[in-house]
Image: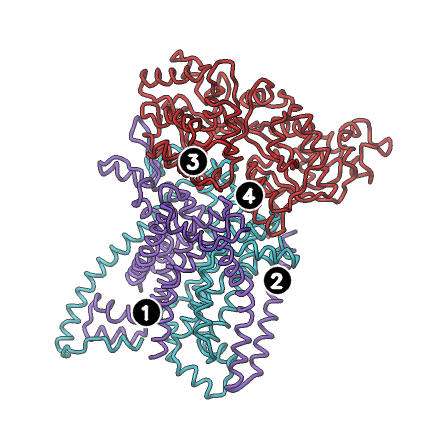
Chain colours: A purple, B cyan, C red
Amino acid sequence: METTDKIVKMLEAILLFAAVVGIILFLASRVRGKKGDKAVAALFLLPTAVMVLVGLVYPGARTIYESLFDAAGSTFIGLDNYQTIFTSSDQLTVLRNTVLWVVVTPFVATAIGLLYAILIDKARIEAFAKALIFLPMAISFVGASIIWKFVYEFRPEQGDIKQIGLLNQVMIWLGFSPHQWLINSPGNTFFLIIIMIWIQAGFAMTVLSAAIKAIPEDIVEAARLDGVKAIGMFRFVTVPSIRPALIVVLTTIGIGTLKVFDIVRTVTGGQFDTSVIANEFYSQSFRSDNQGLGAALAVMLFLLVIPIVVYNIRQLRSAEAR
Amino acid sequence: MTTAGAALPMTTTPTIAALETASGKAKKRLTSRWASLAAAVIALLWTIPTFGLAISSIRPERQIKTTGWWTFFSDPQVTLDNYRTVLSSEGSTGLGAYFVNSFIIVIPSVLIPISLAALAAYAFAWIEFRGRNLLFVIVFALQIVPIQVTLIPLLTLYVKAGLAGTFWSIWISHSIFALPLAIFLLHNFMREIPKELVEAARMDGAGHVQIFFKVLLPLLTPALAAIGIFQFLWVWNDLLVALTFAGGGNSVAPLTKALADLSGTRGNAYHLLTAGAFVSIIVPIAVFLSLQRYFVRGLLAGGLKG
Amino acid sequence: MALRLSRPPKPLHLIALGGALTFTLAACGGSSSPSATGDGAGDGASASGECAAYSQYGDLKGKTVSVYTSIVTPEDTPQIDSYKPFEKCTGATVKYEGDKAFETQVLVRAKAGNPPDIAYVPQPGLLAQLVSTGKAVEAPKEVSDNVDKFWSKDWKGYSTIDGKFYGAPLGANFKSLVWYSPKMFKDKGYQIPTTLDELQALSEKIAADGKSKPWCAGIASGEATGWVITDWMEDMMLRLSGPEEYDKWVKHEIAFNSPGPTAALDKVGSILKNDKFVNGGLGNVKSIATTTFQDGGLPILDGDCYMHRQASFYAANWPEGTKVAEDGDVFAFALPGVTADSKPALGGGEFVLAFSDRPEVKAFQTYLSTDTWANNKAKASPLGGWISANKGLDVNNLVSPIDKLATSVLQDPNAVFRFDGSDAMPAAIGSNAFWKQATSWITGQSTKDTVDKIEAAWPK
């Protein structure tokens, strides 16, 4: 395929898609009144519903079904796979690590993103300052794994051997000896979490910064006239105003963290007790050829997301009550 | 937003308030000095690792593998060989065609899900129907389905439909995976728009389509820009989706595939990855900077007043 | 954007290959029948001579064969080049796709009904998994005959499942090698050991002699971290217990925690977990776990380490400018056996698995199983780094001394050859538990716990 062919193909696709959306909008604009509401909602939701049912609901349901079968997917074994997850010491470590990740990452990443968004708000070089924190988000996982190799890498203190990892070089500059950051559990999990925080803070910063900018100027001005200082401003103006955005950011990073496995896979390969559910799911399904256990681990992810979902339902309800 | 005003302490008398504002200004300058320092520290911590990669990308292979990148400052050895190898259009290491593929993949994969998500989010936020919240929560919870469990069912489907190995399979897949998060984010932004605005439009006899385009869309620009950036990044940096569905040759494979293969069969050529990572990062950064002007202060609030 | 596709246009390659081949193409292109039959005076004798070996494949003009492999840059170029004669003489097109994520992707594609025509499968275990999807097809008789002719019997067994033969071996690698610096050995007067005991004695001597340690190693390899130790253990198992016990171990006819394997791992431990012996230039025993396998042998160049056990492909890992030869910067000797005359050889390799029985696929599969291809491949690899156990491969076509050494061992009828055992074990062991426990072992877990845990993980 030549480049022009590809571009033509892409334009065709976009036009086709625009036509579909056009038809939906046209039909929707023909129905009026309260009774038409349902029809409009159905039209607006139809494409999403079809895609999500085929692409996510069906595979998800299939996964739940497969989790009740053995490694080859041929014999029904009930809840044995789940029993494995909750009894084998390896799998329990995996659960512990996952909880650590989900508890630490969203809050720290959001806190840093929020702090930074406030600090650089209205600064002269705001665009540039934001781009710096945003940078890690733009780097692929392949790039990120090398970046962090140059931070955590260990070389012994002997002869004229030089450190390659920055962290160990800093240790030496400070008069300590180099340390192997990634071997000792559970500390190593925190060093991996730092990478995720490094990536996700940019997401938090971007969304929260947009939310902060949406706070009406008069509220801020009124508060300032009332003598509210920086910390008070943060507590009584900023945070309440951007509360919905904060919840969105925490939720999104939380779910993203549950699913993350690239970091673990590329940096430690899940060794040294650093594996998390998503990584274990991947290695059981695709490396160990244990379809059943892999599926059961995926279902564990579905279960772990429930608290986050419940919290969001509560928020929806209370927002509606207002 | 309304809670903010209520939470303000209103007890200070005007004179004291004026005094405090004066001292507040002095203090503000002080805090802003500390604030600048804190911001600088965060920015520094966040940038140093990437900076190390940037320096490494212009160092010779042997240097990269035996000394730390900071050695560069005491013993600067510069080479463009890494970039030359990565960018060379001879042999299988050239990146040009992959760049094109990445663009072909990313543009529809951003446009399609965001448009569809905007429609769906509108329905969830502004149209009353039974089971609305339940449906919304289901859609948003679908974010958790790991992409890996969808690969075999989806690919089977594409094979049957004759779409396997074409761009279509990649566009559709990316759109599906993006929908739950995009709907969740857009729904949140839409709900923050005051009810009165929408209701006023309805009183004037505007239908849903008109409200969507005339009232909501202008206010949603920052949100759309933000979500657009994230979807762009996700697709641009994706390897798995493209690998699975683009199967059958490099004619539709994106840049990430080429970059992953750069490290070589034995994975020992990671000095090339340093340059490769920077080649691939240019586009997302350009997109981020060009979309930044949409995050203008008070865009949303200003729109509300007018 | 005037960007070109990644592959250079064909004419360029032809020019590069020289006039004779351009002439051949003209001959092939000019006739609709296979050029070997000739179609007039214009062809000339050399053209039909070039293509004579390909006449058996018939005319495949306009046909395409897709190949999916884990071989990516820079090793992909010699692969693609080695298909050129076949493409030229038969008119077929070979569509090559290299992918670092091959091992997981090929399963996904096979299960979803979208397999390539041909896949190069690097492990017998994965081959069995692919066959069990029901999408793979048996190898044609021509391939089977070629394998009988050019390979020793055990190779055929690795890709035979339930009595059905699925694919010919392609490339190979030789794992029982110890890399060393000939110069350092010469300076110190060290002799290349010929038995395991001599190797142990040499290690002791080096450790006692100087500040540099005898061994260096690295096992980090992303999600595959630990595989280096599995190779070590297989080598020791093959030496200490012999090939028959080795086979039983791989097939799980003896338990993983039985005395044989336990002794083998202990033997590995006497080197790798011995703080006096490791980890030259890289730290203590634990540093083995975090050093990448690519970096594991590099301290030899700086004189910080004397020996590094790694397969023949490690030749590609030395930095540019390193001379790999008996009189160069680094070279390798075969890891000795228990006695000086025993020559146990551990190796690996890829197998050609087809998912289609279209004539052009069969033809290409057959071509890959011939001595013609093996020699073409050797000639297309000017930098070396490729070997095969194909007995029809002329060692003189190989350029690098290490390839010649490795091939001569693989072709030696007296050598006891065994395929990498972990690659033939079930995936739950060979690409998960074995790696994982081996890594825990190097960071402190006892040998007994290690073999017990692997035994417990064996699929029932």
Instruction: Decide if residue B290 is on the left or right side of residue C110.
Output: left
- Which of the numbered marks, if any, corresponds to residue A11? 2
Question: Of helix, strand and loop, which one carries label 3?
Answer: loop
User: In the image, is residue B60 above or below residue A225?
Assistant: above
Residue corresponding to mark 1: A242
Mark 1: few/some/many CA within 10 Å (<14, 14-19, 20+): many
- Which of the numbered marks, if any, corresponds to residue C102? 4
Q: As rendered, which of C136 and C329 lies closer to the eye?
A: C136
Q: As rendered, which of C227 and C212 lies closer to the eye?
A: C227
Question: Of helix, strand and loop, which one carries label 4?
Answer: helix
Question: Of helix, strand and loop, which one carries label 2?
Answer: helix
Q: Position of residue B97 (x, y in %)?
A: 58, 48
Residue kind at label 1, given as amino acid type: Ile
Residue kind at label 3, given as amino acid type: Gly
- Contact between labelled residues 1 and 2, with CB atoms less than 8 Å apart: no
Which quadrant holds the N terminus of chain B? bottom left
- Which of the numbered marks, if any, corresponds to residue B304? none
- Contact between labelled residues 2 and 4, with CB atoms less than 8 Å apart: no
Q: Earlier in the sequence, mark 2 or mark 1?
A: 2
Task: Give the mark toward the camera: 4 or 1.
Answer: 4
Residue corresponding to mark 3: C226
Marked residue chain, label 3: C
Instruction: Decide if residue A47 is on the left or right side of residue A244.
Output: right
Question: Of helix, strand and loop, which one carries label 1?
Answer: loop
